[in-house]
Structures are given as structure tokens and as C-alpha cells.
Image (spheres, rainbow, N blue to C red):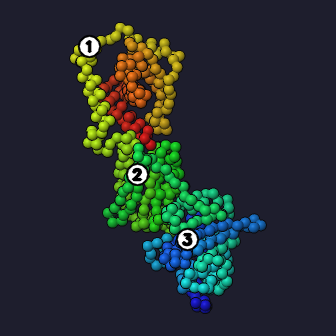
Amino acid sequence: MNNFKNLKKLKVSNHTLKRYRDLDYEVWYALSEFIDNSIHSYLENKEELNSLGINKCKIAINIDKVNNIESLTIEDNGGGIHPNDFERLISVGEPKPKSEFQLSEFGMGMKTASIWLGNRVEIETKHFNLDKAYKITIDIENIGTDNEIEISEVLDSSLSKCYTKVTITQLNRRLLNKVKKTSTCLASIFKKFIENNDIELIFQANTLSPEVVKINTDSDNNPIKKDFLITLSNGKKCKGWIGHMPKGHGSASHAGFSIYRYNRLVSGYPETSWKPSEIFGDGYSARSTRLTGELDMTEFKIAHTKNKINFIDDEEHEFISQIKNYTSDIASEKAVRNSGTSKTIDDHKNDLSTKESNEMVSDYLSDTKNTSLEEITFTADSHLKDQNTFIEENQDLEVTTQFNLFEDTDYETEVSVYEILDINQPYIIVDSKESNLKVYINVGHPWFVNLINNKNSETQTQYKLNCVFDALSEVNVMKRKNKIDPNEIRLAKSLLMKKYGNSFTN
């Protein structure tokens, strides 16, 4: 095709085109439109390109600055653009035919992105089936009333067998001041393609690599993730997974769902993760900073800027209602698997350590040396000091350990643990003031001496943790009921231990 005189021109006026400069866009979204085209072209022609020795789509993006004036170049070694497609290329709103690699679907992305970025766009391309290269020049400021576009045959400027090179000048905005953020975002948007080795993405001479999100693992080092399939009443489906990041690895930017369509990120790290409040709360809990996951929403509608899903009718509400179940599932599974316990009660009963511990309990409680409860008379010990007197006398006692329990939650409590050795005192003494709790553990108590002190440090730890939770539960019930209620104490301890168990295994 050598004669372009009859080629139809852009189907909108330059005044309309200029409006694209004002789109609510970011640099990385604009650049992604060009990358989408490159990947689409490569995947559509992968077999032929592989036969030519092109086994990966290489995309190089470079921002130059000369005399304080910036320019942009995007070049790939994909299939190139055939002259038969030039009309569609320069026509706004004329989409590509449907494809399983539908990264370019609206017929607007590259055009709107180009105009958003700059006023002059040159597209040089050579198709893999042709020997000739062509250049298309779009000058937004100088498009006439007939919307004429300059197309010419040119000498190759690339050594690649096929390529597309886009050069944008007369930029509408500065790009170099967002290089770091753009690098991170592009690596995230095209994470799947980079990991699948379909593309090599180079930005400012640096090959981009996506950040790997660390997920909690069980004792066998298997990631604790929950896979799921959501099916809405209208038939649309979504595959996904959800998991927890370990303590110290989570953050507000990493948390949330990353949404993909055709393996291309729509929203996600580092700034647009989908975090419905019904699942992630108000943004200050551990869930809002450590819960993460991925969603394949290929069957759902997308905004033409490709940066968000367009739910229709009641889709979003129904979607969130279903996905909430899996957030509870993964929390329970994480706690069970991280604690090392078995998956079922039968597995637990048959576990060797369970059998051994049950035998030890049975042997101890069956020992004739241990007095039965029926023979015990509960009387006040004449040696037992009044609690307030005891606390007053031990004000200078050195703290054994001090920590914040349930940090960054409504339950946050500063706990100070002391150890006393007094055979006449109970196993714990509790002193609570506002959000400060002092727990005095009696390591001189016969139970501790005879059963705990001869075991290992882990056994002591478990005993002391129980002492702390007994104290917390008692204080909690006293604050709410102003009296000691055994049932309420058991319930409070259960809830506190569950909450601690969930957070401890994150």
C-alpha cells in the first residue's frame, strides 16, 4: 500500500482532540496505553514472531531533556502496524477486533494518551510481513479543517525485523519529576507479563521488575492463601485469592485487592488497591494493612482509562457480600495453620503430641498423692495480705517484662509483668489503672514450682500467658459489670485469646 491519498482522516476536530489534554490521568496510565498495544501486537502474532527469533516483546521507554525541553520515545519489537490498519489507528473510537488478548479494546487509548502527553506525535512502524517502514505524523495544533494526517514511507531507523516507535514532543506536562513513581507503577501494572517472560519492560534504561508481595506461610513454608470463585446472579465470574502479609511486611499501599483483566492490572499497588470498607475497615486495623489478594475480573466492564472497574446495577454490592466470606475463612485458616494444629478434630486427636499431652494430664490428675477437690475446704488464708497492701509494699519491684498488647487497636493495653515468690499468695495479683495493667505472677506457688518449673521455657511461657489473660479478663469484666462474674470472665478470656491468637499469627 503506497498511496495514502484516499486514506480517511481523523474523525474529530482538533478542538475536540485538545480536550484530551484535560483528562484526569497519570503518566503511568498514559504510558500503559502504548505498552498495551505492544503486548497485544506481540501476543497476536507470537507464533510468527517466534519463528523470526523474537521470543519476547521488548519495550523501551525513554524521556529525554534537551535545553530544558522534554520529549518522550516508546519503542518495541512487536509485530508492527500493517498499513491496512492505519485508518483504524488514527480514528478515534474504532476498536480492534475482539481477541483473547484484549488489552486494546476501545480504539481510544493510544490516541487519548498521546494527546494528553503532547501536541506532536510521530509513529514509525514496520510490519513483520513487509519490507517497508512508514511514519505517521499527528500535529494537533496544525490539523486543518479536513483533519489531514501526514503519512510517508521512510527508511528503517531500527535494526529490528519489525518495530513500532512513537515519539512525542511539545509535551503538555513534565515527566521527569515522576520517574520513580512511574517505574514502580509500570512494573506493577504489567507484573503478570514480566513474570511470564512475555515482555521486557525498560524505563529510562532500567529493566523493571515488579515487587513481590510476601505472604504468611505455614510450618511447611506453604503460603497461607485462600483461592475462590465468585459467581454473580447475572452469570459473571471472578477468580481470585486472598491472604495475609506477615507482620513487618504489610502496609497500606500493599494491602487490598489487585484487580486484573487479561492479566493487566486495573487497580492495585502502589496507590489504587481496591479496599471496600466492608472488608478492610477504616484503614487503621491490621486487616487494612496486611490483608491482600488478587482478582481476575476479565468478565467485568472497565473504564475507558483502564484504571477502574465499572460495576453495573447491583454488581458491586453482591460482589462484596460474597467476598466477605473468604476474608473470614482466611483468618481462621491462617490461625489454625500457623499455630501448627491439625486441620480436623480427628487429625488433632490422632496427633502424637496430643496423645502424649493427654496421657501426662491423666497421669498427673490420677496420682493418689494429689488431693481430690471434695476434700478441699476453701478458707481465707490467715497469711494472705490485702491486695492493696501487697501492691503498696511492692512498688519498687523490678519489672520482669513489659509490652503493649493489641497494639494499634481499641484493646491496646500496656502490660507490666512482675514475678514474686510467696507460697502464701495466690497465683496472680492484679493491679489495673486505665490502660495500664500490672500482673504479679507468683512463681513460688506450688503449682508453678511442682508442675512448671521442672519443664521447659515454652511451658513456662504458656503458663504466664494464661496468667496475663486471666488478669485482663478479670479487669475487663470488673470495668463493665463492677463485679466478678465467672461466666463473663470465661467469655472475656475466650474473646481476648481469640483476638490475640489472630494477631499473633499474622
**Three-letter residue code for mark 1:** Thr
**Three-letter residue code for mark 2:** Lys
Q: Nearer the viewer, mark 2 or mark 1?
A: 2
3 is higher (above) or lower (below) than 379: below
Q: Secondary structure at mark 1?
A: loop
In the picture, the disc for residue 46 is none
Examine the rendering and report whether any part of residue 87 can be seen.
no
Image quadrant for the N terminus?
bottom right
434 or 340, which lies in front?
A: 340
In the picture, the disc for residue 377 is 1
> Position of 481 compared to 157: left or right?
left
Cα distance in 3D space between marks 3 and 1: 83 Å
Q: Residues within 10 Å of mark 3 (few under 14, many from 20)?
A: many
Tell me the residue at 47%/31% (across/down): 413
Residue 220 is situated, as x and y percent measured from the top left of the image, at 41, 46
Tell me the residue at 61%/62% (across/down): 207
Image quadrant for the C terminus?
top left
For disc 3, the marked residue is 57
Examine the rendering and report whether any part of residue 192 can be seen.
yes
**Three-letter residue code for mark 3:** Cys
The answer to which quarter of the image holds residue 420 is top left
Mark 2 or mark 1: name the one nearer the start of the chain: 2
244 is higher (above) or lower (below) than 350: below
> Position of 380 compared to 13: left or right?
left
434 or 376, which lies in front?
A: 376
Cα distance in 3D space between marks 2 and 1: 53 Å
Q: Secondary structure at mark 3?
A: strand
